[in-house]
Image (cartoon, rainbow, N blue to C red):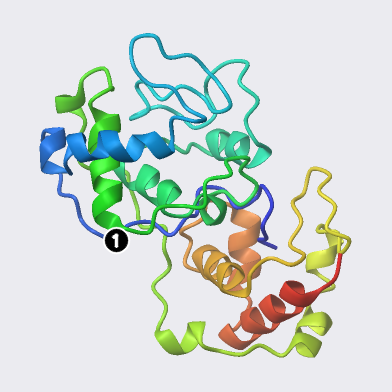
């Protein structure tokens, strides 16, 4: 059952704007100059440029087209390591999703940054980062295999108020793997995960937007009301 732990591989609230398939310069994504100013918020943990080294966070030279968690010897979070094993590649779309809300995209990430909600500022920052790729003009707007990762849900689904008692009744199957205590011993915790994030994650599995066959199968069995009930139960369950 999806939760705030590492199994939330490569979800994120991805930008649903079609960038197009043409090869374009960074200036057509955003303003790299403005992005350099926004970079100041990142530079306390990350380095970029000719002399860049791994610091609190990994260096970001050549981030586009790079497999997640692929810098040797850097201590990535389990969530990003698993995302890398699942084939997550950093593209405009996946980077945009991660920067928008790191903890929703990879819920066990160690990155403390709370996210950048302004889509225009994210585009500027991505333009700046793209200038430090090996061949920035050769990076397509989106990988041919890129796919939507944000489930399309009517407002009324997100507005559903789940019954935590019903959720407790349904939760036994989840708890065959996930520990109610919130412990993470190879399988991530889902205790106290925000309800909306839980709902988005489960519907992403239900719509096969998240790459985990078992979770896709389990989520596919659940109704909208059952997902809301589970979200309500785990969102209030004390560790």
Residue pictured at 71% horizontal, 78% vertical? 230
Binning the other alpha carbons within 10 Å of mark 1 as few (below 14), some (14 to 19) or many (20 upward) gives: few
Residue 91 seen from this side: no
Q: Is residue 40 left or right of residue 143?
A: right
In the picture, measured across the screen, residue 76 lies left or right of residue 119, that is right
* Quadrant of image for the C terminus: bottom right
Marker count (numbered)? 1
Pinpoint residue 228: horizontal percent, then vertical percent: 63, 82
Quadrant assignment, res 90: top left
Q: Which quadrant holds residue 221?
A: bottom right
The reply to whether residue 232 is in sight is: yes
Look at mark 1 in the image and give the residue it sits on.
16
- The front one of 220 and 15 is 15
Q: Residue at position x 32%, y 47% from top?
A: 93
In the image, taking residue 237 as reference, residue 216 lies left or right, namely left
- Given the current orientation, which residue lies at the most extreme top position? 51
* SS for dot 1: loop
Rendered view: 102 above or below 69: below
Residue 139 appears left or right of 6: left
Residue 55's spot in the image, x, y percent?
Answer: 55, 21
Which residue is at 72% across, 73% downward? 235
Figure check: 42 above or below 53: below
Residue 136 rendering spot, x and y as whole percentages = 20, 25
Q: Quadrant of the N terminus?
A: bottom right
Q: Is residue 13 above or below residue 56?
A: below
Q: Position of residue 39 (x, y in %)?
A: 35, 35
Residue at image x 46%, y 59%? 209
């Amino acid at each position: 059952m999806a939760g705030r732990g590492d199994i939330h591989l490569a979800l994120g609230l991805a930008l649903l704007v079609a960038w197009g398939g043409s090869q374009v310069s960074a200036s057509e994504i955003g303003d790299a100059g403005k992005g350099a100013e926004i970079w100041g918020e990142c530079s306390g943990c990350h380095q970029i440029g000719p002399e860049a080294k791994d610091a609190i966070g990994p260096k970001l030279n050549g981030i586009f087209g790079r497999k997640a968690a692929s810098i040797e010897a850097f201590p990535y979070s389990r969530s990003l390591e698993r995302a890398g094993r699942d084939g997550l590649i950093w593209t405009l779309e996946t980077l945009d999703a991660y920067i928008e809300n790191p903890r929703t995209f990879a819920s066990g990430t160690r990155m403390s940054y709370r996210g950048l909600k302004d889509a225009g500022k994210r585009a500027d920052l991505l333009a700046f980062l793209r200038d430090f790729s090996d061949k920035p003009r050769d990076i397509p707007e989106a990988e041919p295999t890129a796919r939507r990762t944000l489930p399309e849900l009517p407002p009324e689904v997100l507005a559903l108020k789940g019954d935590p008692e019903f959720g407790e009744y349904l939760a036994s199957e989840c708890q065959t793997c996930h520990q109610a205590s919130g412990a993470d011993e190879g399988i991530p915790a889902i205790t106290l995960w925000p309800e909306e994030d839980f709902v988005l994650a489960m519907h992403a599995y239900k719509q096969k937007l998240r790459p985990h066959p078992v979770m896709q199968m389990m989520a596919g069995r659940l109704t909208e009301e059952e997902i809301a009930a589970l979200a309500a139960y785990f969102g209030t369950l004390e560790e």
